[in-house]
Image (cartoon, helix red, strand yellow):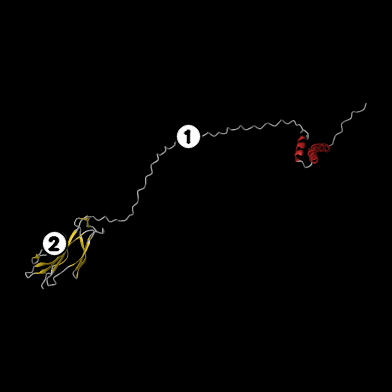
Amino acid sequence: MSEPQHPTDVPEVSRARRRWLLPVAGLAVAVAVPLITVIATGSDPERAAVRYAAAPTSPPPTTDAAPPRASPVPARTATPTATPTATPSRASTPTRRPTPARSPVAPAPRHRATTTTPKPRCTPAGVVDVVQVFTYGVVKVAARTNGEWTDQLCPGERIRVFWATYSRTSDGGAKLYKSQVRYLDRAAPTWTMQLVVPGKCGDSWYVVAGNWSIPQTLKPGVVPFGQGKLNWETGGGPC
């Protein structure tokens, strides 16, 4: 009867080599398969990707380790939804009432800021001015009819104008020597008169406007015609 054969002890070195050779061999297979696939497909990356995906891979070694726990999925927080705000529609906007159209009003004409002289008013019986005083027996008078001054001669009226000269008497008075009367109106508003004087010592003369009477004699020291005198010389003083 033969003795049973005892198992031959494998040295520890051999066991250690087996342990690391198995994983290396598996890794080499995993790398060689996709490399061969890429070479076979050429430069088409899409086909390589498809074949590489379809190539069977060695199943991972099973271990007795417990399956990994599924990580808890965080609960989704409720995303706050935007509360719709009420947007006022155009219809809700208050509309203005149409303003009634006003009739166009013509603007008032602007007047120039110039001082205007009021139109002279006429004066009954008018006013006569001396244009030229007594010069060698000549006197010129004129009624106001040009509108430049007040006291204009009223339409349809005329002014009585006259001149009268006197010579001195022995008692110191005077007597009428010469006289002439004329009327001024708008048709003939001026008069250039030629006075006739005695040419003696103490002569007197008067140019008058108005309805004054012409006296024939004058008492000593009397000056006639009041405020109607326009231009005059009384002839007073010693001779």
As drawn, the residue found furthest toward the top would be 1
On screen, residue 9 versus residue 152, left or right, reads right
Q: Residues within 10 Å of mark 2 (few under 14, many from 20)?
A: few
User: Dot 1, how many residues are within 10 Å of its Cα: few (below 14), some (14-19), or many (20+)?
Assistant: few
Residue 3 position within the rendered picture, expressed as x and y whole percent measured from the top left: 91, 28
Q: Nearer the viewer, mark 1 or mark 2?
A: 2
Q: Is residue 15 left or right of residue 238?
A: right
Label number found at residue 226: 2
Residue 164 visible somewhere in the drawing: no
Q: Earlier in the sequence, mark 1 or mark 2?
A: 1
Query: Where in the figure is residue 23, as x and y percent of width and height?
Result: 79, 37
Residue marked by disc 1: 91
Q: How many marks?
A: 2
As helix, strand or loop, the secondary structure at mark 1 comes to: helix
Kindly report the distance in space between the C-alpha atoms of the residues bearing marks 1 and 2: 95 Å
Three-letter code for the amino acid on which mark 1 is drawn: Ala
* Residue 167 seen in the figure: yes
Residue lying furthest bottom in this view? 239
Q: Position of residue 18 (x, y in %)?
A: 82, 37
The structure residue drawn at horizontal position 13% and vertical position 61%, both measured from the top left corner, is: 226
Q: Residue at x 48, y 36 (%)?
A: 90
Q: The residue under label 2 is which amino acid type?
A: Gly
Q: Residue furthest right?
A: 1
The answer to which of 151 and 63 lies nearer the viewer is: 151
Outermost residue, left direction? 171
Please, is residue 145 above or below residue 1 in the view? below
Instruction: Specify whether 233 is left or right of 81.
Output: left
Task: Give the image quarter of residue 206.
Answer: bottom left
Which of the 4 image quadrants contains residue 99? top left
As helix, strand or loop, the secondary structure at mark 2 comes to helix
Compared to 161, does 85 lie above or below? Answer: above
